[in-house]
Amino acid sequence: MSKPEVTTTRLDDAARAGWLYYVAGNTQDEIAAKLGISRQSAQRMVSLAVSEGLVKVRLDHPIARCLDLAAQLRERFGLKMTEVVPTDPGSTSTTLGVADAAAAEMTRWLRSETPIVLGIGTGRTLKAAIEQLSPIECPQHKVVSLTGNISPDGSAAYYNVIFNIADKIKARSFPMPLPVIASSPEERELLHAQAMIRPVLELAAMANVAFLGIGDLGYEAPLFVDGFISREELDALRRAGGVCEIIGRAFDRNGSPIAGLTNERVASAPIPSCETAMVIATAMGARKMQGISAAIKGKLINGLITDEQTAEMLLGEK
Amino acid sequence: MSKPEVTTTRLDDAARAGWLYYVAGNTQDEIAAKLGISRQSAQRMVSLAVSEGLVKVRLDHPIARCLDLAAQLRERFGLKMTEVVPTDPGSTSTTLGVADAAAAEMTRWLRSETPIVLGIGTGRTLKAAIEQLSPIECPQHKVVSLTGNISPDGSAAYYNVIFNIADKIKARSFPMPLPVIASSPEERELLHAQAMIRPVLELAAMANVAFLGIGDLGYEAPLFVDGFISREELDALRRAGGVCEIIGRAFDRNGSPIAGLTNERVASAPIPSCETAMVIATAMGARKMQGISAAIKGKLINGLITDEQTAEMLLGEK
DNA sequence: TAGCTTGTTGGGCAAATACTCACACAATGG
DNA sequence: CCATTGTGTGAGTATTTGCCCAACAAGCTA
């Protein structure tokens, strides 16, 4: 404690370089001179700071167009909370921007003093969002996974993010040690009746806020790509009118759950009710359009984080 | 409302360009192409976004050395809150870093749900801090100026920041329409007895948190440079042992107020008590050393935002 | 100890960026 | 009406940055 020697880690140096670069406005040459390293090393430090996510850039100018679209979405679809981020016209990313926005929104919730239960879905968008999340201590909260975290091959489901989020925030976390889709309806009942699972399901039902991804059911449906359902099962869902999937459960274009098929084997918790919780979907891109639209129509969600282009398309629909 | 035409301002474009650059990671060439402007214009947009403060960079890696220094300061001097930012070795700025940190700390206070009274001092550091502050709506709070805002020549005191802060946050603000230093003790009493001033003084005494700058009394003493006191008055204060000045009031090296002289004419509110409020000083640099040290010794403050180098010097003193 | 992998460093260079300048244009004022 | 001033634009250029590569050190294996 009184020792003046404090171990300086690699990341400390990176943070310092990043600070000198972004906050103090030095050039990399100057940083190199001040830190007694070569310019290349300084460059590496700075870029390390960026790639490690030490450097967070925020734009706090409300862009009129985005605010307007957000307000229109709220009004038109009766949503309680919407956020619209700018669109990068050339990018094919399906998470760019919304991930940051989702992370920021999560942070707002987590900063609450009063304990909350945060339900968390799955998917690429959420995974990216959690990566953006700044570490924050919030032992007062509970985070509960809404889906199982076991792949058909027994490995951990890659896009289940409960462990990632638990890493970032010091809250009690509740994973669901279940396959995403059980092999039969009976197995699902059996699994859900387990003493270890029941409390998690109960907690999920009590969520104050939930963040969900929306999966499409096209050729590249994440549910299929990640091996949770077979091509035949995917086709069957589509023939039955399925257009999207939320935490594994398929819905038609009106947001009604598809009857039977894989839906009767999905081991996920029910989506928390909009009556009792803020249910926020984070999704953008043309492929998600139908899904977002369906989730809104079916009143599955009451919050949406999306991008400009998607917002325009949603509003453009009759 | 339903009109699709939303006026796009200059800053909106800047924000969009900044977003594409910093968040989406485009080059300025790409931005130019996407926005249909020349590369130079794109560059200008981005740099405008930066200079307008639309782009906020945050480093959320706790640098071990800074944390350690902060902890040492707390322990050694019995402070409740300390923050130490990295030092830029070559820079002569006296606000770099601490201004951002002060803005962040203010934001934390302002985000509180329960109404608080925020006392605000004066000076270059605070001015810079307020500039960094993101707009935030907090009608529940009150912001009260601790010093008068009238220069000897009748103009508004430039470094009085109450109006700047009022601009940024939507809280009720209470300026003190008084000269900083009255012409006589009697005038001060008279001014303070005014019906418009008394409530402000009472509010200042009730502050939950106050942010103060510390001014030195050297050749470039802000109080003198800004024309509030004459060279003779400055010299007199120094001869009387004055080493620093907080909201216009001079203190000796032990943090005791200088008796008589300009001190008996300073029209500022008393510094809020450390018993009832968080009194946070933001100051860095060699010239402020004595002042910071005095403020600590005199228990005028219980919080400090400073930089690495200053922290080291403070801890290095016997 | 030679041979290998792994990780770090600095040189060099192409790409990207910041800045200066000259000019066009609109608003302002005589 | 023209001069003036401020603001925005494009061209050109100097600076800064990102990245590839070869060299080198450290650790590990045989």
Image (cartoon, coloured by chain):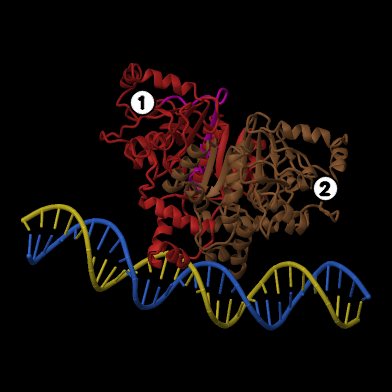
Chain colours: A red, B brown, C blue, D yellow
Task: Report helix, strand or loop for mark 1.
Answer: loop
User: As drawn, is A38 to the left or to the right of B141?
Assistant: left
Residue on which the image places disc 1: A265
The amino acid at mark 1 is Arg
Foreground residue among A254 and D14? D14
Foreground residue among B308 and A271? B308
**Residue A176 % position (x, y):** 36, 27
Locate residue A259: give its quadrant. top left
Counting other residues with Cα less than 10 Å from the Cα at mark 1, is it few (<14), some (14-19), or many (20 or more)? many
Marks 2 and 1 share the same chain: no
Q: Chain of mark 2?
A: B
**Residue B13 % position (x, y):** 65, 58
**Which quadrant of the figure contains the N terminus of chain B?**
top right
Q: CA distance from mark 2 to mark 1?
A: 76 Å
Check if residue A286 falls in the magenta segment: yes
Foreground residue among B24 and A178? B24
The amino acid at mark 2 is Pro
Residue on which the image places disc 2: B179
Check if residue B185 falls in the magenta segment: no
Foreground residue among B106 and B72? B72
In the image, the segment drawn in magenta is A269-293
Counting other residues with Cα less than 10 Å from the Cα at mark 2, is it few (<14), some (14-19), or many (20 or more)? many
Instruction: List the single residue furthest toward the front.
Output: B239
Q: Please indicate, yes or no, whether residue B204 appears anywhere in the rendered image.
A: yes
Task: Name which residue lies at 35% across and 42% down.
Answer: A225
| Label at residue B173 | none
**Residue A224 % position (x, y):** 35, 40
User: As drawn, is B246 to the left or to the right of A236?
Assistant: right
